[in-house]
Amino acid sequence: MSEPILLANIGEPDSQTLEKYRSSGGYEGLRRAISDMSPADVVEEVKKSGLRGRGGAGFPTGVKWGFVPKDSSKPRYFICNADESEPGTFKDRLLMEQDPHAVLEGIIIGSYAIGAREAFLYIRGEFADSYRAMAAAIDEAKHASLLGMKILGSSYSLEIHLFRGAGAYICGEETGLMESIEGKRGHPRLKPPFPAAVGLFGCPTNINNVETVANVPLILRKGAPWYAEIGCERNTGPKLYCLSGHVKRPGVYEAPLGVRLHDLIYEHAGGMWRQGLKLKAVIPGGSSTPVLRADESDIDMDFDSVAKAGSLLGSAGVIVMDETACMVDSLLNILKFYAHESCGQCTPCREGCNWLVKIVRSIEDGKGKSADIDLVENVAGNIMGKTICPLGDAVAMPAQSFVRKFRHEFEEHVRLKGCPLKGAH
Amino acid sequence: MISEKTQKKIESIASKLPQRAAAMLSALRLIQDEIGHVPPEEREWLAGKLGVSPAAVEAVLSFYTLFRREPEGKYTIWVCSTLPCALRGCELLMDHLRHALGIREGETSPDRRITLKRAECLGGCDRAPVVQVGEDYHDVLLDLSLGTAKVSFERVEALLEKLT
Ligand SMILES: Cc1cc2nc3c(=O)[nH]c(=O)nc-3n(C[C@H](O)[C@H](O)[C@H](O)COP(=O)(O)O)c2cc1C
Ligand code: SF4
Ligand code: FES
C-alpha cells in the first residue's frame, strides 16, 4: 500500500486547523498560483496534471475550467458540489470533516483560475459536522487573508457562500443543484446551454466535486509532472475509494487510480465480513453503476478500465455483496431509492422507476412471471437516454445489469414463488 | 412568529446573495430550527421577505425531505435503509425500533417524544447500519460478534434513553 497523499493529514490531531494544514505545506499552492501565475497558467497546469473530475463522470478538470468564457460581461461563479448522496459514497464527508482547508484551498485556486469573485459550497443537509468544519475553516482563512478582500496582498478577492441542502439526492446533479441554490425545487435543467455558458443565476459557472478540488492544491504545490506520475495512463492521481457492504472493514481508502479492485476488497477492507462466505457481486462506483459478478470483478479501478469491464468508476462507492445477498432484493432496494428521488419532470423516469419497483417487488415476493424478467429489461431500455438528466440512466443501468448477470436468480424466484435467501443473515 | 433575531439573520443572508430568493433554503432551515416546523404564517412572511410567491415557498417545502410542514416528535430517528445499510441488517434494526417504541414508520410516539422515519443513504455507509438523530449519526447498533447480525439491544436502549 502506498503512502497516502490526499489523506496524509487525516487522522492527525487537529487536522482541521489552519495551523496544522499550513505546517505541511497547506496554502503554498494558492500562494504560488496567486503570486507567480496568471489564471490561464493555473488552468494550463491543471490540464497538464491530467486530473479528472471525481464527482462521477471523470471529465478533465482543466479542460472544464477552460470552457468558462473570459470575456463575459456577467459575473462568473465557482461551485463546489458537496451534496454527496450516491448510495455507497462517503469520501467527501471525510475530506470536509477532517481536512476542510484542503477543500477550501482548492475552491479558492479554482475560483482564481476561472476569474470568479464569488464561490458557492453546497453541502448535503444531513452533514452537520462537514458544515461546521467548513464554516470554521472559512473563518480562519478570512482572518489569515487567504480569503476575502485582496487575498495574500494581491488584487484578487473572493467571497464564499455556504449552502446546506435539505434532503434531495437530485440536487447533486449540477443543474438541479443550481436551481436549489436559487431557492427552488432541485429540478435539473435541459442542456444545452451548459453551465459554463449559462449556469447559476444565468451566469457562466463551473462546478466541481469536493474530492476534485481537494486534489488541486497538491497539483499547484508539487507541480503537474509530479502529479501526473501517480496512477496510470490518462487516469492520474490519488483516488478515494469507499468500501461498504459485506466487507470486514468498511471505510474510505486511498490508492492511486488503477488499483486492483480485489486489493481494495481483500487487503484494504479486510475481505468478507464473515469467515467462509464467498464474494458474489460488486457494484464498483455507487449504486447507479452496473453490477459486476465475482468472476469479472478483479479489475483495475480507473475510469477507463472499469468502463472497459462494462461498468463505471462513478463515485468509487464500492458496494460488496457476499453469497447471502439476494440479487432481486438488492435491485429492488436500489430501484426504490431512485424511484423516491426522481424529480418527476420526465415521463420515462417518473413512470418507469415506479413500474420497475412494482415488477421487481412482485418477483421478490414470489408473484412474478417469467415474462416479467424480460419486462424489467424492456422498461429499463425505454428509460435509458430518454430523459433530461442522467438519473434515468442511473436507474436503468442497475436494472439491466442485475437481470443480465444474475438472471438465474430472478428465474429461481419465479420458479420457487419466493426468495430462497430471505432471512439468510 | 419567529424571533427578531432570526428575522434579522434571514435578512442578512438574503442581502448578501446575488438574488434574495437564494436565501430560501437557509431561511426555511432557520425557521424550522426555531419552531420545529415551518407553519403557514411563516411561509407567507418568508415569501414577502424574499420577493417570491407563497406558492414558490410551498413548492420548495414539499420537495425537500428535511423540511417539516407539520410538528413532529421532539426527536426524529432516521433509520437508513439503502443498500449498504440493508446488506448489514438495517431491517432488523427497524423492526426492533418499531417494537421498542410501539409505533409504525412515519409515526410519532404518543408522548410526542420520538418520530420514526426511514432515510435514504446518509453518506455514512462505513458505519452501516446507521441511524441519524438530530445532527448526530449513531452506528454499531448491530452486534456481529456471534457471526450473524443481531440487534444490540443494549446499544439501542442506551440511545433511546438519551432521547428524553
Ligand atoms: C443524479 C445525479 C446525482 C449526482 N450527485 C452528485 C453528488 O452528490 N456529488 C457530486 O460531486 N456530483 C454529483 N453528480 C455529478 C454532477 O452533476 C457533476 O457532474 C459533478 O459535480 C462535476 O464535478 P467534477 O467534474 O469535479 O466531477 C450527480 C449527477 C447526477 C446525474
Ligand atoms: S431523469 Fe428523472 S430526475 Fe432527471 S430530470 Fe428527468 S424526471 Fe427528473
Ligand atoms: S446506505 Fe446507509 S448510510 Fe449509506
Image (spheres, rainbow, N blue to C red):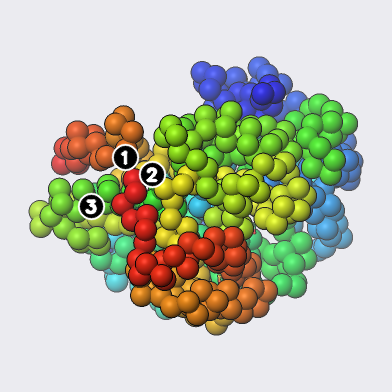
Asked if marks 2 and 1 fall on the same chain, the answer is yes
- The label shown at residue B88 is 2
Which sits earlier in the primary sequence, circle 2 or circle 1? 2
* x, y percent for residue A387: 63, 76
Q: Secondary structure at mark 3?
A: helix
Relative horizontal placement of residue A293, taking residue B64 as reference (left or right): right
Q: Viewer-nearest of labels 3 and 1?
A: 1
Q: Are marks 3 and 1 in contact (CB under 8 Å)?
A: no
Residue pictured at 52% horizontal, 33% vertical: A271
Q: Amino acid at mark 3?
A: Asp
Other-residue count near label 3 (Cα within 10 Å), few / some / many at <14 / 14–19 / ≥20: few
Chain letter for mark 2, please: B
Nearest the eye: B98 or A51: B98
- The label shown at residue B149 is 1
Q: Secondary structure at mark 1?
A: loop
Q: Secondary structure at mark 2?
A: loop
Chain letter for mark 3, please: B
Residue pictured at 30% horizontal, 67% vertical: B69
Q: Are marks 2 and 1 in contact (CB under 8 Å)?
A: yes
Q: Is residue A324 visible?
A: yes
* x, y percent for residue A68: 81, 58
Which residue position holds label 3?
Answer: B95
